[in-house]
Image: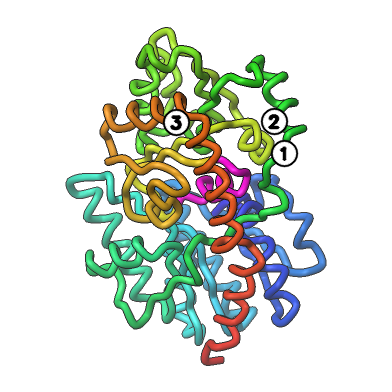
């Protein structure tokens, strides 16, 4: 649905696949997002896939996809994200595309209740049923989906240790110059402990819990920087919960690696995640994480070695983790060094891309 997903996560994989295959990338390019890295490697085709629920628009989009798939005669349909997965897998199934792959990267229904939870879960089950092959971006998410009856074990697989695309360990790395520059830009002293969140701002990310935990008087000398678009206009409530603590916001950055290099601790108190890519990006920058002990995230953090896990929704536990790392520089540095080594060893982007190429070579086409 969004070319940004391709740009941020999939460009390296698509470029590598294009060296062996004829690749077409279908996304809603009406947003104006450019994919310069893929020009000349893959064809880019715009189809107006809407992320939101829009029945009439979705039917028109499905018809458009059916026409495209029939015209092109694809051998493989590889889908990412729920709406694109649902519509494209339906079109591919109807036209009997031989290989239909879907990638699960998290489930919105986990934090829902009532009929809407049932509907969203049923959609995931339908996508999995339409696909001939399923990839999941973390081992614990795969186990969860199998346990929930969404996936079957024989059809699904995780590449290496997980994540949708790994992390660029050259882009995300310890960087003293970036650390000094960013801290100077936002007015943070070199010795000030900086906690960081990067991602979309919504309640499911546990940001109200994070703000409440950060209100502790023991953290008055620290700063919490929250970077990302405010999808649900939650900033005022976060300020209220944080009291007089030093809470700062930034709408967007094209260089999250610089902010991770500037930070001391990365925070992800989320209620649901498919994996937690931002955690391994921060880890590659040498930054330990404080994160929820939920499926997906627990595959990105080794508790007590590369960061600290806490129960989801537990403000007291989050506060305890923040105080512990704020007060113990030796521990922060030890966890950060181990996090960097862990990210390089298990989640380097070239290794994940190579695993996908090998996966394609084993497909029945």
Where residue 277 appears, as percent x and y from the top left, is 52, 51
Work out whether mark 3 precedes mark 2 in sequence or the reverse, and give the earlier one.
2
Please give left or right for residue 129 compared with residue 49 in the image. Answer: left
| Residue depicted at 44% across the width and 31% down the height | 325
- 304 vs 353, nearest the viewer: 304
In magenta, the rendered stretch is 276-287
Q: Name the residue under label 3.
A: 325
Would residue 87 be visible to someone looking at this image?
no
Q: In this view, does 334 lie above or below 117?
A: above
| Residue depicted at 28% across the width and 50% down the height | 110
| Residue depicted at 55% across the width and 66% down the height | 64
Q: Name the residue under label 2.
A: 179
Would residue 282 be visible to someone looking at this image?
yes
Label placed on residue 175 = 1
C-alpha gap between disc 1 and disc 2: 6 Å
Work out which quarter of the rendered image holds the N terminus and state it. Answer: bottom right
Residue 271 figure quarter? top left
Q: Is residue 145 magenta?
A: no
Q: Is mark 2 on a helix, strand or loop?
A: helix
Q: Is residue 282 magenta?
A: yes
């Amino acid at each position: 649905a969004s070319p940004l997903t391709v740009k941020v996560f999939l460009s390296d994989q698509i470029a590598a696949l294009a060296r062996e295959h004829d690749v077409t990338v279908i996304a809603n390019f009406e947003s104006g997002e450019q994919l310069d890295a893929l020009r000349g490697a893959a064809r880019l085709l715009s189809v107006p896939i809407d992320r939101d629920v829009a029945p009439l628009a979705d039917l028109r989009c499905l018809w458009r996809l059916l026409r495209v798939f029939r015209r092109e005669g694809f051998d493989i349909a590889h889908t990412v994200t729920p709406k694109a997965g649902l519509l494209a897998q339906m079109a591919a199934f109807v036209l009997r595309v031989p290989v239909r792959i879907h990638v699960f990267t998290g489930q919105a229904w986990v934090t829902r209740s009532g009929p809407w939870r049932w509907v969203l879960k049923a959609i995931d089950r339908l996508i999995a049923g339409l696909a001939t092959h399923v990839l999941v971006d973390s081992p614990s998410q795969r186990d969860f989906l199998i346990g929930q009856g969404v996936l079957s074990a024989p059809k699904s697989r995780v590449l290496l240790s997980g994540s949708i695309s790994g992390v660029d360990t050259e882009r995300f790395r310890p960087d003293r110059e970036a650390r000094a520059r960013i801290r100077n830009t936002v007015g943070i002293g070199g010795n000030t402990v900086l906690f960081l969140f990067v991602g979309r701002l919504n309640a499911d990310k546990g940001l109200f819990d994070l703000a409440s935990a950060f209100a502790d008087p023991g953290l008055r000398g620290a700063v919490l920087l929250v970077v990302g678009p405010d999808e649900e206009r939650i900033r005022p409530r976060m300020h209220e919960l944080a009291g007089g603590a030093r809470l700062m916001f930034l709408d967007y950055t094209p260089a999250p690696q610089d902010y991770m290099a500037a930070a001391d601790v990365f925070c992800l108190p989320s209620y649901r995640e498919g994996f937690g890519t931002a955690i391994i990006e921060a880890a590659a920058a040498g930054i330990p994480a404080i994160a929820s002990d939920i499926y997906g995230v627990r595959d990105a953090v080794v508790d007590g070695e590369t960061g600290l896990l806490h129960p989801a929704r537990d403000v007291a536990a989050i506060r305890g983790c923040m105080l512990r790392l704020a007060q113990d520089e030796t521990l922060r540095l030890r966890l950060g060094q181990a996090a960097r080594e862990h990210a390089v060893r298990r989640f380097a982007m070239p290794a994940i891309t190579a695993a996908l190429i090998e996966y394609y070579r084993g497909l029945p086409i």
